[in-house]
């Protein structure tokens, strides 16, 4: 892959977790100040005015991300905070599921993502590239009018070499066309699908609410409605992911209702997809949105990323961390105990005593009694039956097999020692029972059986 072109300074920003400060925006942008109303020394805006909603989006993108966009009057104007929260969550998913096990952003890591349904704003690719200079984005849409505006916005921000857009000629076409794009693998797929299955479904969503929608909607029918609504659309992505599997590290989707999230999570569980994550993308005190992500690879996101935001118990994935309380044992003493224990196992173990952090990688369960006994017998048999190497035999194939075996990791765990507690972070693996078993081994070594 050729190096990415030099870009302006990228933006580092955390989640939006409250309402936007209109006073701050008005002080930074005269265009926004002009559309604000003031009463009792407090600024407010009319969210039922399409021009006001557009200006707020343009101002937030300009002031917080250094982006500029143009929007048609007959297509969706995307609220920025929730969209950014979606991008930020994907960043954390990738940052905490890398081969380095660092849980931090690696500025040198090149990432390729796909936005299904970029819309006229092209907001997700723009936000992704503005915040991470080593990221590239592909985007698709079934609407030529929206795609024309999206391309203008890409050009206006100088991102032609990092954002690639493609028209989907049919609503029935593949949603993740990796082969058609000449791409073998992607780091993530994202989508903000139409939430409703029909116009009646959309109208029904407002029935019984005490207040009208928080902002005027200018979306076209293809942006608001599709067969099966958000659940139907995301189910199509799920079906395609079952064929593509590990060619994409993370499949993600935004959902409009908690019930939609519950339905998709239930589908994942029925299909045996155990590595998934969920989030609530609420940015202020009004509209809530949710997102789900799933992966067929073994890297596990950090626990606060896998279970992010305000959620209900029924959608939570398996926890990826356990904490063991250690009373009467110093951080150093606890570290020495576990260092000695793990060194005696047939695993890879990287221990840093000065920081109190160790990373263990295992190809299988080698700590149970049965596993230790079987391992001992296997070594005896292998030693007695080992054939002699014939002269002139090519050893390269055997070396390659050994290298391939070294890449097989059934479980990876990071152990962090602190005063009074030890945290075990599930880094990699598809078998929760294996992680639980290793946690039990560690707990018995530290505090004894209970």
Image: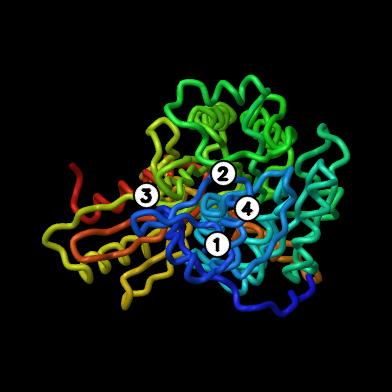
Q: Which element type, helix, strand or loop, lies under badge 4?
A: helix
- Quarter of the figure with the N terminus: bottom right
Name the residue tied to disc 1.
Answer: 34
Identify the residue shown where x is 15% and y is 63%: 329
CA gap, disc 1 to disc 2?
40 Å
Give the structural element (helix, strand or loop) at label 1. helix
User: Could you tell which of marks 1 and 4 lies nearer the N-terminus?
Assistant: 1
> Where does the image place residue 246, in percent across and percent down from the top left?
67, 48
* Mark 3 secondary-structure assignment: helix
Q: Work out whether residue 106 or residue 320 is closer to the camera in this orientation and state it.
A: 106
Q: Nearer the viewer, residue 17 or 435?
A: 17
Secondary structure of the residue carrying numbered label 2: strand
Q: Earlier in the sequence, mark 1 or mark 2?
A: 1
Identify the residue shown where x is 68% and y is 43%.
245
Regarding residue 409, the answer to whether it shows in the image is no
Mark in the foreground, 4 or 2: 4
Q: Is residue 421 left or right of residue 385?
A: left
Task: Work out how far the residue at label 3 is from the one at label 4, CA to CA, in angstroms.
Answer: 53 Å
Disc nearest the viewer among 1 and 4: 1
User: Which colour scheme appears in the figure?
Assistant: rainbow
N-terminal-most mark, 4 or 2: 4
Mark 1 → mark 3, Cα distance in angstroms: 61 Å
The residue shown at (49%, 65%) is 25
Which residue is identified by label 4? 54
Estimate the spatial distance between the alpha carbons at disc 4 and disc 2, rounded to whole Å: 29 Å
Is disc 1 in contact with disc 3, using a CB cutoff of under 8 Å?
Answer: no
**Spatial separation of the CA atoms under disc 2 and disc 3:** 26 Å
Which of the two discs, 2 and 3, sits closer to the camera?
2
Label 3–label 4 contact, CB within 8 A: no
Q: Which residue is mark 2?
A: 293
Residue under circle 3?
438
């Amino acid at each position: 892959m050729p190096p990415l072109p030099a870009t302006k300074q990228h933006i580092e920003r955390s989640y939006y977790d409250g309402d936007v400060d209109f006073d701050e925006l008005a002080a930074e942008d005269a265009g926004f100040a002009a559309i604000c109303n003031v009463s009792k020394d407090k600024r407010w805006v009319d969210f039922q005015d399409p021009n006001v909603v557009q200006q707020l989006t343009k101002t937030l993108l300009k002031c917080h991300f250094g982006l500029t966009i143009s929007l048609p009057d007959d297509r969706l104007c995307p609220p920025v905070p929730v969209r950014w929260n979606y991008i930020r969550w994907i960043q954390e998913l990738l940052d905490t599921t890398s081969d380095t096990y660092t849980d931090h952003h690696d500025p040198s890591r090149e990432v390729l993502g796909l936005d299904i349904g970029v819309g006229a704003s092209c907001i997700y690719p723009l936000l992704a590239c503005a915040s991470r200079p080593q990221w590239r984005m592909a985007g698709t849409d079934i609407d030529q009018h929206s795609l024309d505006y999206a391309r203008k916005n890409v050009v206006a921000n100088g991102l032609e070499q990092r954002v690639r857009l493609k028209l989907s000629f049919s609503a029935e076409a593949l949603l993740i066309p990796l082969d058609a794009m000449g791409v073998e693998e992607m780091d993530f797929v994202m989508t903000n699908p139409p939430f409703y299955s029909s116009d009646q479904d959309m109208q029904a969503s407002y029935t019984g609410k005490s207040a009208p929608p928080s902002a005027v909607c200018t979306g076209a029918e293809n942006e608001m409605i599709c067969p099966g609504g958000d659940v139907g659309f995301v189910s199509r992505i799920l079906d395609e992911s079952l064929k593509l599997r590990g060619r994409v590290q993370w499949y993600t989707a935004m959902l409009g209702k908690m019930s939609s999230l519950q339905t998709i999570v239930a589908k994942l569980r029925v299909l045996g997809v155990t590595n998934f994550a969920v989030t609530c993308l609420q940015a202020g005190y009004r509209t809530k949105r949710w997102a789900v992500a799933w992966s067929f690879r073994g890297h596990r996101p950090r626990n606060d990323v896998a279970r992010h935001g305000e959620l209900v118990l029924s959608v939570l994935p398996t926890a990826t961390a356990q904490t063991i309380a250690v009373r009467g044992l110093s951080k150093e003493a606890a570290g020495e105990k576990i260092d000695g224990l793990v060194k005696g196992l047939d695993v890879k173990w990287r221990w840093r005593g000065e920081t109190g952090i160790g990373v263990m990688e295992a190809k299988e369960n080698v700590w149970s009694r049965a596993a230790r006994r079987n391992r001992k017998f296997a070594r005896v048999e292998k030693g007695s039956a080992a054939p002699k190497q014939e002269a002139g035999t090519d050893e390269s194939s055997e070396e390659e097999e050994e290298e391939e075996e070294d890449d097989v990791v059934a479980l990876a765990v990071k152990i962090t020692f602190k005063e009074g507690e030890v945290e075990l972070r599930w880094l990699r693996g598809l078998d929760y029972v294996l992680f639980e078993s290793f946690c039990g081994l560690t707990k018995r070594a530290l505090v004894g059986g209970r």
